């Protein structure tokens, strides 16, 4: 008997048909004698709608947020009515759902009156999505004669107070999961846990960042000592590139933890970048599979780096990026300029996604999310004001509308000439590379190119990855 933790994403719980597939998948797994833990996302689009409701409330648009709340209420009620026959159970679930929507309206009202949403209130509002879906999925499972129980992760997943991007408090989280959840598995109960959310020590809801259900599911998978962790989503597995950018994308049968870490960090939305963190030391195999095509074996993610015929396994991209370039002849030999610029960037609240420095040290460039570029530029200029006045630094320039493309593959380590090959391909495709950097793990190389060149560049690089993936 194995313990299998399964995470179902937004689309996988986004419709009656999808939830029915979920029930079949869980049923088949339990019928094989395995213990199952379910972690769910909000129904697709619900998190976005909740965020929108906050924005409307801040603007004082009462009818706006009321209408969004009503639409969501209707959608959830409809799903319950379709999934459950008229019964006391159906009434109980409807009543629980309606209570949550009443609270949603109340919180929006408070925001509307104050015309301000604190991060703490925002997370409380956004938490409704998963709290709603877990109740529906658990009820649907019970309908399939599975002893399922909706559980609120706020009771188990303890975090710090960095709302919207909360960091788990590992020891306390482990203690709570082992003490309160683990015994449940022995009593034949299938927990249906809310993904994405946790709580502070004083019980305020927090969220782990957009797409964070993968991450919370990984935490539960780890502390519940799972033998397998399956991420059920809406594509057949981890693919050679985003299928929405290049339709030729193929499923990779196997990728290593390290490779998938790079893929996720550099934009492959299929997995939250932190997902492998709780798993990696335990060596739990992760599968990425399709709720809508469960007979497909999907992608296995594991410890080994398997040699691949192509050195490049996959291509990812991050859009809406700006690149800052600090340049000046006088930078040569002035120590610490890059360090101070990065510290100033951090103080401005921005994360750096990629850094590249020319060997002559006459310029340093780094990328940040597009809408933070002007704030960062200001912060860097303030920090380096002395050097700018002395003309050691000539300029801090922003190139907006650029993208980061990354090619990933563990086989790059020790394979000379990969960057050269990539440059040739880009040159042949007429793509101008603005900056290049190699990941510290040596299993990725990233490039900055103009947004206008993105599609052409991805297709050209993708050719390299497709060379050896079976059809
Ligand atoms: P979920 O709601 O199940 O968490 P997401 O929308 O977060 O699903 O992630 C799945 C989506 O990620 C896919 O529909 C696909 O469009 C996108 N995606 C981007 N890059 C990749 C990739 N390399 N492999 C697979 N899917 C990818
Ligand atoms: N519902 C959350 C989001 O849309 C978390 C997730 O789906 O993983 O970001
Ligand atoms: Mg996701």
Image: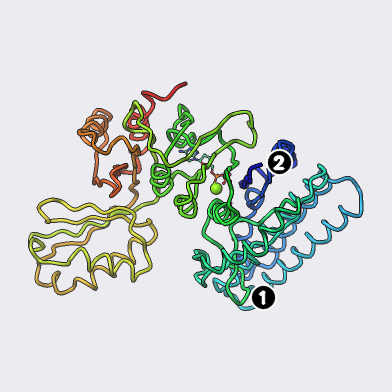
The answer to which quarter of the image holds residue 338 is: bottom left
Which secondary structure lies at badge 2?
Answer: helix
Please give left or right for residue 209 compared with residue 339 in the image. Answer: right
Looking at the rendered structure, the secondary structure element under dot 1 is: helix
The x, y position of residue 458, in whole percent, is 36, 35
Q: Position of residue 364 (x, y in %)?
A: 19, 56
Q: Position of residue 401 (x, y in %)?
A: 34, 49
**Lateral position of residue 380 relative to residue 64, left or right:** left
Q: Under 8 Å from ligand 1: the CB of mark 2?
A: no
Residue hosting label 1: 110
In this orientation, does residue 133 appear?
no
Residue toward you, 74 or 126: 126
Q: Is residue 441 visible?
A: yes
Q: Do tag 2 and tag 1 residues touch (Cβ < 8 Å)?
A: no
Q: Is residue 147 left or right of residue 434?
A: right
Lower sequence index among marks 2 and 1: 2
Ligand 2 contact, mark 1 (Cβ < 8 Å): no
> Between marks 2 and 1, how big is the CA–CA gap?
40 Å
Q: Residue furthest right?
A: 87
Residue plotted at (63% across, 71% down): 60
Seen in the picture, residue 354 relative to 2 is either above or below; the reply is: below
> Where is mark 2, residue-wise?
26
Quadrant into which the N terminus falls? top right
């Amino acid at each position: 008997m194995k313990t299998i933790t399964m995470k179902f994403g937004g689309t996988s719980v986004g419709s009656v048909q999808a939830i029915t597939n979920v029930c079949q998948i869980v049923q088949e797994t339990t019928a094989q004698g395995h213990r199952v833990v379910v972690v769910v996302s909000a129904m697709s689009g619900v998190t976005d709608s909740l965020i929108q409701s906050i924005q409307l409330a801040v603007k004082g648009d009462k009818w706006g947020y009321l209408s969004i709340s009503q639409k969501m209420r209707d959608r959830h009620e409809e799903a319950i009515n379709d999934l459950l026959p008229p019964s006391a159970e159906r009434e109980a679930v409807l009543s629980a759902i309606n209570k949550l929507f009443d609270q949603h309206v109340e919180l929006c009202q408070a925001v509307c009156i104050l015309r301000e949403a604190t991060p703490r209130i925002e997370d409380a509002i956004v938490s409704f999505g998963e709290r709603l879906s877990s109740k529906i999925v658990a009820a649907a499972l019970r309908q399939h004669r599975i002893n399922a129980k909706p559980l609120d992760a706020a009771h188990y997943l303890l975090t710090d107070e960095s709302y919207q991007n909360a960091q788990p408090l590992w020891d306390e989280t482990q203690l709570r999961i082992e003490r309160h959840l683990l015994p449940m598995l022995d009593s034949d109960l299938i927990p249906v846990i809310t993904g994405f959310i946790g709580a502070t020590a004083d019980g305020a809801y927090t969220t782990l960042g957009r797409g964070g259900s993968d991450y919370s599911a990984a935490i539960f998978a780890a502390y519940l000592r799972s033998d397998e962790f399956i991420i059920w989503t809406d594509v057949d597995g981890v693919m050679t590139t985003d299928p929405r950018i290049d339709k030729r994308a193929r499923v990779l049968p196997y990728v290593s933890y390290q490779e998938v870490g790079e893929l996720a960090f550099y934009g492959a939305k299929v997995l939250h970048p932190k997902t492998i963190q709780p798993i990696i030391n335990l060596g739990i195999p992760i599968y990425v599979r399709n709720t809508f095509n469960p007979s497909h074996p999907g992608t296995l993610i594991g410890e080994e780096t398997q040699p691949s015929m192509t050195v490049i396994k996959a291509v990812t991209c991050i859009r809406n990026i700006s690149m800052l370039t600090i340049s000046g002849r006088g930078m040569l030999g002035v120590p610490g300029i890059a360090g101070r610029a990065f510290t100033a960037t951090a103080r401005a609240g921005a994360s750096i996604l990629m850094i590249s420095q020319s060997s002559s040290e006459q310029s340093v460039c780094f990328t940040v999310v597009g809408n933070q570029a002007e704030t960062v530029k200001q912060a860097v200029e303030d920090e380096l004001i002395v050097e700018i006045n002395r003309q050691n630094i000539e300029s801090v320039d922003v190139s907006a509308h650029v993208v980061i493309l990354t090619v990933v593959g563990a086989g790059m380590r020790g394979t000379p000439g990969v960057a050269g090959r990539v440059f040739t391909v880009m040159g042949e495709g007429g793509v101008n590379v603005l900056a290049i950097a190699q990941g510290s793990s040596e299993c990725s190389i990233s490039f900055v190119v103009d947004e206008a060149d993105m599609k052409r560049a991805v297709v050209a690089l993708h050719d390299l990855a497709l060379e050896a993936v079976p059809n």
